[in-house]
Image: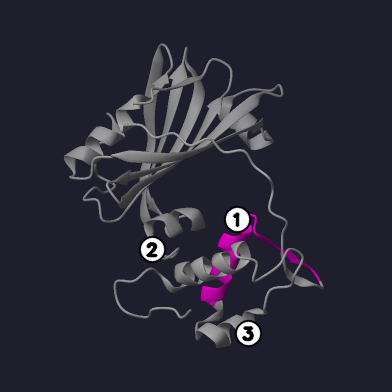
Amino acid sequence: MKLSFQSGQKPLWSQLYDILESRILNGDYQEGEVLPSEMALMEEFEVSRVTVRQAMDKLINAKLISRKRGKGTIVLKRENTVATSFQSSFNGVEEKNNANDRRVISVEYASPPIDVAYFFGVSVNRPVLKLTRQTYVDGKPVTHYESYINPIVPVDDQTDFSGSMYAKLEQAGYPITHVKEKITAALMTAKEKEMFGVTKNEALMNRIRMGSSEDIPIEYTYSRYVANGYELVIDLK
């Protein structure tokens, strides 16, 4: 399989990631096997070292490979996971949080994390709009959101996001019609304790939401929730 260098295609690193991911999942590269070197991949696909490294970074982030000093890049054992798939209307996803106060912390352009760049199909070097918000209950922060918005959406760092982000996206011509989410839980890190103003070990719920308008990727949101008192209700249609 070759990369497409034509204008309008996915970034080269993203195309390369798709190919390498497919080879791993299909067993072309076996668990514990050393992947071809950066130089070998550069020669095979006729791309730069930067392109290869960006694809590798995405594979590492996806927990498909790991760099081992003195050994090279190793294919990892795929973890057995249990996944639940929901099909519902977007309006069926509701967050319940009593007496909440959501505040916009910042609206700025920032380099997207590699997962965001891959979802949008843009270069990691292309700044995208980043919206940071927090929700407060009884004066204390309980939720932290970092939302990235696809550059095709006609909004910018001067847009007023004090209301609903999804209403704003709909006004811009890109209503969110379906979402995909990944939810995990873990104890807070020291940085997260500082963020939420807690001193004890508390559980934190992490949620990644990928929202699309029909088949167009529009928003990628990282959310952190203080687990105590948070309830997610999914109304399946």
Q: Earlier in the sequence, mark 1 or mark 3?
A: 3
Q: Secondary structure at mark 2?
A: loop
**Cα–Cα gap, marks 3 and 2:** 25 Å
Q: Which of 49 and 56 lies nearest the eye of the viewer?
A: 56
Q: Label 2 amino acid?
A: Val
Q: Residue furthest front?
A: 26
Q: Residue at x 39, y 35 (%)?
A: 87
Q: Residue furthest right?
A: 70
Q: Residue at x 32, y 79 (%)?
A: 6
Q: In the rendered view, does 30 fall on the left or right side of 163? A: right
The residue at which mark 1 appears reads as: 61
Q: Is residue 173 above or below residue 204?
A: below
Mark identifier at residue 122: 2
Residue 147 falls in image quadrant? top left
Q: Position of residue 179 (x, y in %)?
A: 38, 39
Q: In the rendered view, does 78 fall on the left or right side of 206? A: right
Q: Is residue 224 above or below residue 50?
A: above
Mark identifier at residue 105: none
Tell me where the magenta segment starts and ends, as one range.
Answer: 50-69
Q: Secondary structure at mark 3?
A: helix
Q: Residue at x 65, y 66 (%)?
A: 27
Q: Is residue 59 magenta?
A: yes
Q: Label 1 amino acid?
A: Asn
The residue at which mark 3 appears reads as: 40
Q: Earlier in the sequence, mark 3 or mark 2?
A: 3
Dominant secondary-structure state across the stretch colored magenta: helix
Q: Position of residue 94 (x, y in %)?
A: 38, 23
